[in-house]
Structures are given as C-alpha cells and as structure tokens.
Amino acid sequence: MRRKITVVGAGFVGATTAQRLAERNYADILLVDVNEFIAEGKALDLLEAGPIVGYDVNVSGVTIKDGTGYEKIAGSDLVVMTAGIARKPGMSRDDLILTNMKIVGGWAEQIARYAPNAIVIVVTNPVDAMTQLMWHVTKFPKQRVIGQAGVLDSARFRTFVALELGVSVQNVEAYVLGAHGDQMVPLPRYTTVAGVPITELLPKEKIDALVKRTRDGGAEIVNLLKTGSAFYAPSAAVAEMVDAIVFDKKKILPCIAYLEGEYGIHGVYAGVPVQLGAQGIEKIIEFKLTDEERAALHKSAEAVRALNKVMGI
C-alpha cells in the first residue's frame, strides 16, 4: 500500500510541494485548500502530468467548506502545513502571527483528530512559532512535529557562497541554525567548499555580507515579486525532508525541533541540526559552538519564545 501525504494549502508553496512529491512517485498526494475547487483543479492538472513525466501515483484535491472535507486527510503518513497568508513587501514574518495562528491552530485540531499517526512538517510563517503551536495543539510526540527552515536557509547560504567563489553549489556545505528570519544563525565555521571552511577562503567582511544576504533571503524575493514570496526553494526543502523520512535516510539536516536542554535551551522550538528518519526527528545533533554563536542561538530562541507568549502558549 502506498504512503499518503497531505499538503495543506494549494497556493504556490503547497502546489509546488505537491508537484515535487508526486514526481518522486512514492506516495499518493492529497492537496487541500479552503478556496473552492483550487485544490481539485491543481490536483487534476498534476494527475494529468503523470503519463508524461512518468509518475503513477494518485493526486487528488479537496475543498474545505462549512467544516467538511477534513475527514479526507485520514490515513495520512505525513502532513505538510503550508496554509496561511503570505508576506507582502515591508511585512515581517512576525506580522503574520495573529492571522496564521488561527489557521494553523485550527488545522492542528483536525490533524490530531483524523491523522493521529502522521508526521507533520510545518512551513507556514512565522514557522518556528507555528511549529510550536502545531505541537502544542496536536499533543503529538515532539519527534513527529518538525519545522522547515534550516534546509531552505542553508540552501540560500550555499547558493550565495557558490556565486561568490564561482564554484558548484554541490561543493558547498552549510548549516544555518536558529529562527527563520532576522534571528537566524548562519555558521561560517561549519560552511565549507570541498571541505575547506569559508573562513579560510573569504575575508570577514565578505562573509558578513553573505550572512546578511542569507538572513534577508526571503525578503529579497518578496521585494522582487511584489505580490508573493518564495516557493521553488521552500518546496524543494520540504521534499528533501520528506525524502529523508520516507527512505529512512538518517540524514543530518537543520530543522526546527523542540529542545529540552540541547544547546542549553529548554521548552522551545528552534532550528538545529537533526537526524531525520522514518520516525521523524530521531536525534538532535549538538555542534560545538563558540560563545558568540551560542549567544546568537539563545537570542534566536528567545525571539521564538516571545512569539509563543503572544499566542498564549
């Protein structure tokens, strides 16, 4: 029996995520949305692409209307939460919290009811706080509620380093920890090109500029698009996480995880390296950080804690 993956939200991120997962050919995909027939239309379009692209999974869509349709997510092995309002120019991720907490909180109740055994990947911004809210409401084990941020932020950092040095992105490895947004913590010491730390390849001022561009990576795209936000790279990041879970890869990826003392942080979701496998987050990996890096990570975690207080959790 094939796996079932539900993608909540049929906007750019959700629909592109559904496409990437369908093309992997390892799970049936359910796309859901509150806007009438958007999910059904995009799902049918994806289904009809199967004979051409070569995948043979079922892709279906459902509209959530008048409180009905939630039952369709029953049996989901994974749920990817992308629904929420998108950022507009000049809007921070934190500005989204009051609206998106209602959306994510409502969905968390339905996921707990109809898909109690699912692993949930949260993408909705502000993603650190939304991941905490998803865990708080579903009451799922912490290993099964994961936030997507570090894979995307690290990919952006890798991209900018590769562009600066004129090398293949495949030669660049990077880790970005902390909250998704202004408080993220790129780690230049752990960012390498063919195994060589960029601290040995670039001057500090250039590294600082790359770090700043990484922190502003989402806003840069929002300002260019004017009426939307990134979706190609975020959906690719989700797919990499899903791959690690479906194939039990035990892959080390930076994800938003609930911390209970790791890195000296307690009771809050924050971006850290984790081992991702069939059970979700199977282990939290603790890097040796400098005092400055650790202080930045703690500051990032406190920013998330402040948002959690706004939500009353």
Image (cartoon, rainbow, N blue to C red):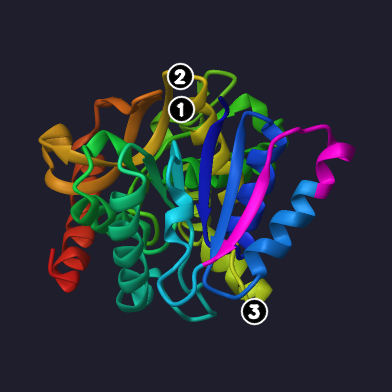
Q: In front: mark 2 or mark 3?
A: 2
Magenta-highlighted residues = 48-63
The residue closer to the viewer here, 82 or 297, is: 82
- Quarter of the image holding residue 63? bottom right
Label 3 and label 1: CA atoms lie apart by 34 Å
Three-letter amino acid code at the position of disc 1: Ile
Q: Residue at x 64, y 25 (%)?
A: 171
Instruction: From the image, tell me which residue sits under label 3.
Output: 226
Left or right of 33? Residue 60 is: right
SS at circle 2 = loop
Q: Residue at x 42, y 46 (%)?
A: 74
**Label annotation for residue 248:** 2
Q: Position of residue 295 (x, y in %)?
A: 18, 46
Earlier-in-chain disc, 2 versus 3: 3
Three-letter amino acid code at the position of disc 3: Lys
Three-letter amino acid code at the position of disc 2: Asp
Instruction: From the image, tell me which residue sits under label 1.
Output: 245
Q: Identify whether 7 is placed above or below 95.
A: above
Q: Quadrant of the N terminus?
A: top right
Q: Residue at x 23, y 59 (%)?
A: 304
**Label annotation for residue 62:** none
Earlier-in-chain disc, 3 versus 1: 3
Q: Mark 2 Cα within 10 Å, few/some/many (few <14, many 20+)?
A: some
SS at circle 1 = helix
Q: Position of residue 30 (x, y in %)?
A: 57, 49
Disc 1 and disc 2 in contact, CB within 8 angstroms: yes
**Residue 61 shown in magenta:** yes
Res 231 visible = no
Q: Identify whether 103 is placed above or below 283.
A: below
Q: Quadrant of the C terminus?
A: bottom left
